[in-house]
Image (spheres, helix red, strand yellow):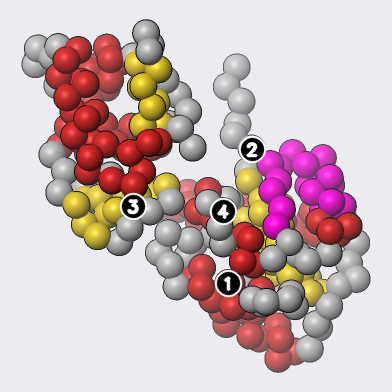
Amino acid sequence: MVMNKKERVLVVDDEQDLLEILRFNLETEGYEVDTALSAEEALQMDIASYDLLLLDVMMGGMSGFAMAHSLKSDPRTADIPIVFLTARDAENDKVTGFNIGADDYIAKPFSIREVTARVRAVLRRADKKDGEKPKSVLVYQGIRMLLDKKTVEIDGVEVPFTKTEYELLRLLVSERGKVFSRQELIDRVWPRDVMVLDRTVDVNITRLRKKIGPYAQHIVTRLGFGYYFDE
């Protein structure tokens, strides 16, 4: 039986008690939940790995609006749904949030049932949008693969990859955490009519690590088993 991957939610609020309440209830609903006490703390995390963000608007330091604006300006995070949680219920604040690109806006005080229902609805809409067109971008931190163009950007700079290197990276990044034996990589990446030695796989992995630079440590060798992409 294949289990569906849990959808990941990041909650950002400077109220510790509220964070714990939201985490508990969202996890009860079946989501994988992380929390941060400030926008600055959240921006140190792998934002692109989340399926939805719950952001408080009024926090010390960077506001939720400023954080959302930053995320919407970055192609790696621009499509992540955002729901604002805030005590501010003025019409102008709502307009500001929606103009930034928010998917919903919940005024405090709110019921937990309302929050979970809104989260479920926003994720359902996002899933529907994703189903309307094939995913054309594969992202992990500063690695960005444009699947239609078959190109790779590392921290915003396009880096040339051979077809084999590209397919190796796509496979490892798209199935992060899975260990692939050399034979599995050969079967998945190389043409069936080409004779490929284990050493050829090792050489291509070495080249791949050099090309992805600061992210090379994520391609891990599991001695006796093969390679995997470690988050």
Q: Earlier in the sequence, mark 4 or mark 1?
A: 4
Judge whether 168 appears above or below 97 on screen: above
Q: Find residue 117 and report its horizontal and vertical position in percent.
A: 79, 55
Q: Which residues are magenta?
A: 20-36
Are there few (<14), some (14-19), or many (20+) residues within 10 Å of tag 4?
some
Q: Which residue is mark 4?
A: 45
Are there few (<14), some (14-19), or many (20+) residues within 10 Å of tag 3?
many
Q: Which residue is mark 3?
A: 144
Q: Residue at x 13, y 39 (%)?
A: 162
Image quadrant of residue 40? bottom right
Check the image and name the residue furthest to the top.
Answer: 224
Which residue type carries mark 1? Ala
Judge whether 39 appears above or below 204 on screen: below
Specify whether 154 is left or right of 199: right
- Of circles 4 and 1, the one toward us is 4
Q: Which residue is mark 1?
A: 68
